[in-house]
Amino acid sequence: MPPTSIGIGLIGQKFMGRAHSNAWSQAPKFFDLKVGTRLAVVSARDATELAAFAKRFGWEKSTTRWQSLAKNPAVHLVDIGTPNNMHAEQALTMLAAGKHVACEKPLARTLAEARVMRDAAETAGKRVKTFVWHNYRRAPAIGLAWHLLREGKLGRIFHVRARYLQSWGAASTPMSWRYDASKAGSGAHGDLNAHLVDLTRFLMGEPIVDVHGAVTPTFILSRRSATGKGKEKCDVDDAALFLATFAGGATASFEATRLAEGHLNDNTIEINGEAGSLRWSLEDMNVLEWCDASDSPRLRGWRKIMATSAGNHPYAANWWPDGHITGYEHGFTNMAADVLRVLSGEKPELPLPDFADAYETCRVLEAALLSAKHRCAISLSDVL
Amino acid sequence: MPPTSIGIGLIGQKFMGRAHSNAWSQAPKFFDLKVGTRLAVVSARDATELAAFAKRFGWEKSTTRWQSLAKNPAVHLVDIGTPNNMHAEQALTMLAAGKHVACEKPLARTLAEARVMRDAAETAGKRVKTFVWHNYRRAPAIGLAWHLLREGKLGRIFHVRARYLQSWGAASTPMSWRYDASKAGSGAHGDLNAHLVDLTRFLMGEPIVDVHGAVTPTFILSRRSATGKGKEKCDVDDAALFLATFAGGATASFEATRLAEGHLNDNTIEINGEAGSLRWSLEDMNVLEWCDASDSPRLRGWRKIMATSAGNHPYAANWWPDGHITGYEHGFTNMAADVLRVLSGEKPELPLPDFADAYETCRVLEAALLSAKHRCAISLSDVL
Amino acid sequence: MPPTSIGIGLIGQKFMGRAHSNAWSQAPKFFDLKVGTRLAVVSARDATELAAFAKRFGWEKSTTRWQSLAKNPAVHLVDIGTPNNMHAEQALTMLAAGKHVACEKPLARTLAEARVMRDAAETAGKRVKTFVWHNYRRAPAIGLAWHLLREGKLGRIFHVRARYLQSWGAASTPMSWRYDASKAGSGAHGDLNAHLVDLTRFLMGEPIVDVHGAVTPTFILSRRSATGKGKEKCDVDDAALFLATFAGGATASFEATRLAEGHLNDNTIEINGEAGSLRWSLEDMNVLEWCDASDSPRLRGWRKIMATSAGNHPYAANWWPDGHITGYEHGFTNMAADVLRVLSGEKPELPLPDFADAYETCRVLEAALLSAKHRCAISLSDVL
Amino acid sequence: MPPTSIGIGLIGQKFMGRAHSNAWSQAPKFFDLKVGTRLAVVSARDATELAAFAKRFGWEKSTTRWQSLAKNPAVHLVDIGTPNNMHAEQALTMLAAGKHVACEKPLARTLAEARVMRDAAETAGKRVKTFVWHNYRRAPAIGLAWHLLREGKLGRIFHVRARYLQSWGAASTPMSWRYDASKAGSGAHGDLNAHLVDLTRFLMGEPIVDVHGAVTPTFILSRRSATGKGKEKCDVDDAALFLATFAGGATASFEATRLAEGHLNDNTIEINGEAGSLRWSLEDMNVLEWCDASDSPRLRGWRKIMATSAGNHPYAANWWPDGHITGYEHGFTNMAADVLRVLSGEKPELPLPDFADAYETCRVLEAALLSAKHRCAISLSDVL
């Protein structure tokens, strides 16, 4: 029997800590759920900030020892919002303790780490659920795209075009864990291509089978230390591009970068099929554009659909009237609601990625790295 | 001495009840405020829904008798989120009881009602604060526009162009209080032009002095009853257009409608000055477009500025990193934070409209109605 | 029997002289016409420029005496591309001589002048044809809009929204005939609103019956002389706004200005009907946007149609493959082709405005001026 | 001494024949050139259409034997507008006869052919000029981009993103020479990537040094014959994607396809540098977008510059006032004017590609084909 209230234990109090705290708090207000939530405990390293953070977002308790969550009976699900180098250890600990785990993306620094996490999830058994915070799946416009593809509205797919362009990585930006391979694993590739690979796999519903080539340059080789003293070496990619093919034959191009001036958070995906095309962009995330090839050429064109209509678009009924847009944080809230649905035996509005699924995304990311390194095409069947 | 926690009493549990409940709940999480909040009591007519609503949004108590809020010592501020015909009575009652009042827009059904409310606010004295929920003032992009105008970035203003286009008012839409003049006062005019007049007055910082002409048609004369039986007469405008002049000589055109297919919630404002132009649209509300006439013609053009940058754009530091957009509800939360700042003796991020200010907006709306009725220009000095 | 070749006599060698010369030269290359053209003679005041102009564009002869065209048997059609103060005299002279006349817009400086021209056209009889260069009617995307309206694709029309925004009229722009009421008649009103009124009347196919209000400010009262010595007074409007109603009840708003920084040549028209909406903008003139209300709300949105498809869009077959855009000058060429079709007994692709039709446009412009002057609504039945 | 009039001999009367005929006819009307033009002779295979074509566009003579142009003393420049398989033979013949040659793009079907053409041009000596119709270089907005890059407005370049998306290649489109490798050489690759590689090389002013991977799928394997009887095999790529690096280290991604529903003629290029970004799209070709990283983050954003301003933007002074757009055909006319300038000893407005330059473009295209075939990265130094 599912519990009547899910106890959440969160690790992390930075960007993701805030986003997840908000999601767990908002979900019960805007969704009709069969299960309650309890913000049981939040854990983070910096004790000086932690008490205020916990109070602000309504966490009952706080601790600087994340390990303590494993034995806390009030915690049913551990939510991991830490840097990438902590994901594997924390997830393995919590899975071993029988906790459900919701982990931030990318799942891990390396494919090897991801594989261990996937295996641990499998070992933990069916009663223990895993989730990965690929939050953009839950933008209503992406949900609409997912449904249209399943309805065959695009027919045979020819092309997938995915790019995630940001611009915060200029030479003037100081060092952080995101530029340190030992902590982040990779740079734009793991951070941004992870989103693109997850989203396109989710939308297409079929695997990527081939990577045709890749390039992962580091343009800024060192940065001033965040402490203000001296410079530190950067050893992650600033950008990562690769070409691939999906199982059904569609070509796919991926580009992630932190050096595209003019783009703040531009996650843009387009899919071209014989029966039509779709495109979506995070910076105007409430809109899905659709071109229907069954329209007469006389009246054919990209339709700009605002995916804000209750009853017509996923999650829209939980928020505001037509045309009253939701934003970045709502992807997390919509996902928290779906996680709670799954934990109470209901179906989520849209499929959720678990560790096994996120491992498949990591395989594609790894194939791209191998392709860049060896300057050759890589078949996904060779990447396990 | 200001209280350490502001007790809120809300009236209303529909669209605005949800938006305001969310705002009061979110403001303390995302803003550093000197004062706490207490969601003391919510009041609404429909008792069957009320208990669940109160629980969902964390209201301590609920009541079907709104009048009881006047005597409730736990309530410092009464938030009025009811249909327009209730505003005056509720506000007058609460002001007389010494409560701060935050009232939904439009302030009242008629200018006469608005005048009584303004006078009551004045009578209540300086210790009692009034606020009107002109929430769009607090979109970060509008805040940026306000600052640019104050910095003289547009120079002498020639034109203001404001329109609020929606499309939910087709003949198939059933009867509601919004089509009944006895409850709503007017149709698109009071609902949508109220936003436009407030926003343009706020941005311009000067009064409208003349209305040159107006037209306020009712296209759909009756609608099927919401009960399903028979038809009911509609006696409000479906659209309202008028031309005006600001004190400094700028022309202004206003258009509000519920019958503009293709527009869901399209509140668009543009201002043209000798030194540049600005424009903003609610459906892509995080963006402010600016054209700087001091740029060389060779490089001049509309700049699409995403007003999401911490330290650079109002309210942005309270939310997410650059390019991670906020939405409709955040205008209310940003306003709730500013109301709480004012009540704790701090300055708001941007000026807040009180009853006296909203009365000036009502005067302009009234001048437009008179112009339409009498088929002539109306000087604002004749509307008191 | 129509002539096998139409002899053209052009008056004017400036902006319009170039545009018209190009149109007469290009039309026979891109259209299959039953009649040839002969660029018989061009007339203009400035003899020093004229010979080179005539040679460049292939005019057989040139003359500084425009009156001589009236008696020139090689001239069948006189094309008037002069400032507005010359239109009436030149047109009357040519009509009296039995020449077809194609006159630049606006038809005349004043309604009185326009009336005389209309009457002269009527007196000249059916054998003599008149045309007015409302060139934007012949943008392919406008042609598509015209057809969609005739097919009932928009149903009952609620709103027409038309604005023509330019920015070349800053205080630094020197004096020219366009700022002198004795030559131009009016400013932005006759220059730009003339386009808007013609286009909306053309698209709607019904008269404007009421003007509700208008404002026609002059912001820049004097300008430096083009000769460089001293300043000269400007006595035309810099902007002109008015509200109107079409016979079927649709509201219409018009705005023309030369002081809208950021807009170079922004002639934008939108029409909202119960069955859908259309919009078009000259700066991206190959696109027609259409929102079809019969689409499900789930998939409804503005479609961006590129009106460049041979067989699907007016005039497109005469130019380039799909997606290869045409520009400003093509409206004139398309119109020249339609004029030549009419003169050889064929039907034009789209209806052409004659003096009687342009007179109706002038009546609306006059009603707006009267409304601004008398600060009241004006019924078109009172303007003759 | 240069001739006072350049005699043109054109081969081809289809799409390119029309575009080039128009260009030679229009250039002297809109440009002040030191040399005249004479449309001496047009050659094409289909005699039944040829006489009418020649008359329509003003060609003095016509012939079905293109070889005769080599010996025609009235012909100074031979303009080759034929399918790709004819380019080499025709160009070699004309170069050997001492004629200037302007050849359509792509220069040749294969790199081997292109090399022979380049060598023949070199052999012909400096008195004989060669040109390749990479017409998009001469869109005014591209010219502006070229200048901004030369002025260092983008600083160090990180990324080039180029794609040319069309949609006319659906399975229902019948067979043509464009789907036959023996005539076209390749499909979308030679047709569309040829434009992209030329444009990005032109803008960047540096060579591509590496191709990292490529994929060139054929999705539609056979098509119905244009004769209506049976099906024919298609052996060219429907799409071609590749990744590359410029000499300065910038990554570049290229995608060309005829199967991107929703895109008619979408040639879009974006360049990101440390000091700013640029982007341009052919479907709205008068606009250049620029983001200047030296603008404060508060006011930074993409500027939409209409490159139509006389004195500020290349070629703009030759056409119409600001905001009056030019279209597809003007690229050819602007190029014809520049060719005539070069032939009369003047400098072109912007650099023109000759056979040696177009050969470098062909090398990049060849490297991409080799990369796709061998499934590995290809260094350009290995492709000669």
Image: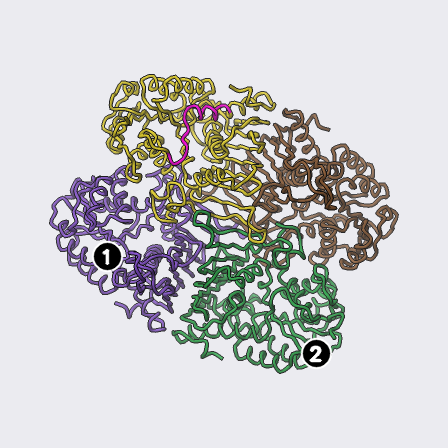
Chain colours: A brown, B green, C purple, D yellow
Q: Residue at x 42, y 61 (%)?
A: C159
Task: Specify few, some or many for label 1: CA neighbours under 10 Å numbering under 14, 14-19, or 20 or more.
Answer: many
Which residue is identified by label 2? B70
Which residue matches tag 1? C355
Quarter assignment of residue B177: bottom right
- Image side of residue C247 versus residue C96, left or right: right
Q: Are marks 2 and 1 on the same chain?
A: no
Quarter of the image for the N terminus of chain B: give it.
Answer: bottom right
In the depicted structure, whether residue C50 falls above or below residue C114: above
Asked which secondary structure carries label 1, the reply is: helix
Residue C204 in view, yes or no = no
Q: What's the residue type where badge 1 is placed?
A: Phe
Q: Residue B88, position in %: x, y?
A: 60, 77
Span shown in magenta: D348-363
Residue B255 location (% of width, % of height): 46, 64
Which mark, by number, is residue C60? none
